[in-house]
Image: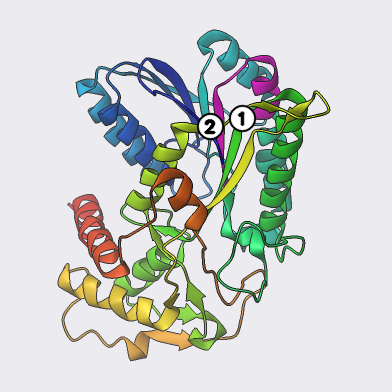
Amino acid sequence: MSKTKIDLNEKTILVTGSPGFIGANLVIRLLKEMTAGIVISFDSMNDYYDPKLKEYRLGLIEKIAEKSSVKHVFIKGNLADKQLINKIFEEYKPSIVVNLAAQAGVRYSIDHPDVYIESNIIGFYNILEACRYHEVEHLIYASSSSVYGGNKKVPFSVEDKVDNPVSLYAATKKSCELIAHSYSKIYNIPSTGLRFFTVYGPAGRPDMFYYSATNTLAKDGTIKIFNYGNMKRDFTYIDDIVEGVYRVMQGAPQKQIGEDGLPIPPYAIYNIGGGEPENLLDYVATLQEELVNAGVLPKGYDFEGHRELVGMQAGDVPITFADSKALEEDYGFRPTIGIKDGLKKFAIWYKEYYGGLEK
C-alpha cells in the first residue's frame, strides 16, 4: 500500500493511554528520537490495576522529558469526555494521534461490560470526531489479536474474516476498526489500526498472565494454567511493539480519489506479532527459570507444587498466531525478540521494582 511519509520532528503528537504500558514506552521513544516538537500524554489513571505502576511509568517519562528537546505535556482525563477531547485538539492541534487508550482485558469484560463501551466505543468515537474537525496527518489506533476469535486458520492474516468475536473486548476492538474505516472513507482521515499480539515486558500490565503468575509465585501461591496447558500465544516483547508503532507513525495511508470522485479510504490494518507462537507450558518454564536467575524465586523452587492445570476460561482462545508479512513489506519490520531475552528483562525489572518497594 502506498504511504505518505511523515517526519515526526517539530510535530505535535497526541498519545492516549500514556502512561499505560505501550503508551509510556512509545512516548519515551519519541522523546529520545525527536529533536523538536510536542508530545502529549493522555490517560485517566484509573484503578483497573494499581495506579502506582502508571505513576512509576509517568515518572520515567518525566525523567526523559527533562533531558529532551521535545516538550512533554501530561493531561489527566477520560476519553469519553468529548468536551475535554475537543479542547485538547483545539488548543494543541495534534498532527499525529496514537490512540492506545482502552479498557483492556478479555476476562474483565465478562463482568464489567459498561466500561468497555464507554472507553473503547464512545472514547474512540470522540477521537474520530475530533480528527474529523481538526485535520490530522495520521491516526494510529490499537486493535487486538482478540478480533480473530476462535479462527482455526493460522497464522492469522488481516485478510481473514473476523466476524465471530468470543468476548465483548474483542467485539469493541472490531467495532473500532469498522468505525475508523467509515470515518476514513467519509472524511478522508488517514488511519492505521494495529492488532497487537500478547504484549509483555518490564512494567507491563499486572493482569497479563506472565505478570500475575509472577506475583502469585512470589507469594508462594499456586498459578492456574488454562486449557491444561494446551494453548499457544504469539508473545510480543514491548520493544518490538514500540518499534512497529514508531515506524507506522511515519507512513500514513496515501489519500486518493476514486473513479466516482470520492475518497478511497486511506485505511490500513496490520498485525504486530512475533510470528512464532509459544506453547504456554514452555513459556511458563522459561519464566520460572528467569525468575530464579533474577533472584525473585529461590533456587530449587517447587514449581510442580505451585501450578494447577485447569480447563479453558470463557472468552479465551487456544491459539494466537500473527502473519506480519504486510508490516514487513510496507515498513521493513517484523518482531525479533524471543521469550528468553524478553522474560529475562522482565524478571530483572521485577526484582528491582518490588525489591525497591520493600525497602
Quadrant housing residue 39: top left
Give the CA distance from mark 1 to mark 2. Answer: 6 Å
Q: Which residue is mark 1?
A: 190
Q: Which residue is mark 2?
A: 252
Could you say which is closer to the camera, residue 330 or residue 190?
A: 330
- 330 relative position to 261: left or right: left
- How many marks the image carries: the answer is 2
Quadrant into which the N terminus falls: top right
Q: Residue furthest bottom?
A: 304
Residue at the spot x=61%, y=34% of the render?
A: 191
Q: Is residue 242 magenta?
A: no
Range of residues picked out in magenta: 127-142
Residue at the spot x=34%, y=30% of the render?
A: 30
SS category of the residue bearing label 2: strand
Q: Are marks 1 and 2 in contact (CB under 8 Å)?
A: yes
Q: Is residue 42 visible?
A: no
Residue type indicated by callout 2? Ala
Give the vertical position of 334 relative to 292 (above or below). Answer: above
Q: Is residue 135 magenta?
A: yes
Q: Residue furthest top?
A: 91
- 311 relative position to 286: left or right: right
Give x and y (percent) for residue 81.
66, 25
SS category of the residue bearing label 1: loop
Residue at the spot x=48%, y=23% of the render?
A: 75
Mark 1 Cα-neighbour bin, 10 Å: few <14, some 14–19, many ≥20? many
Residue at the spot x=51%, y=45% of the render?
A: 47
- 74 relative position to 16: left or right: left
- 214 relative position to 350: left or right: right
Give x and y (percent) for residue 217.
33, 74
Mark 2 Cα-neighbour bin, 10 Å: few <14, some 14–19, many ≥20? many
Q: Residue furthest front?
A: 259
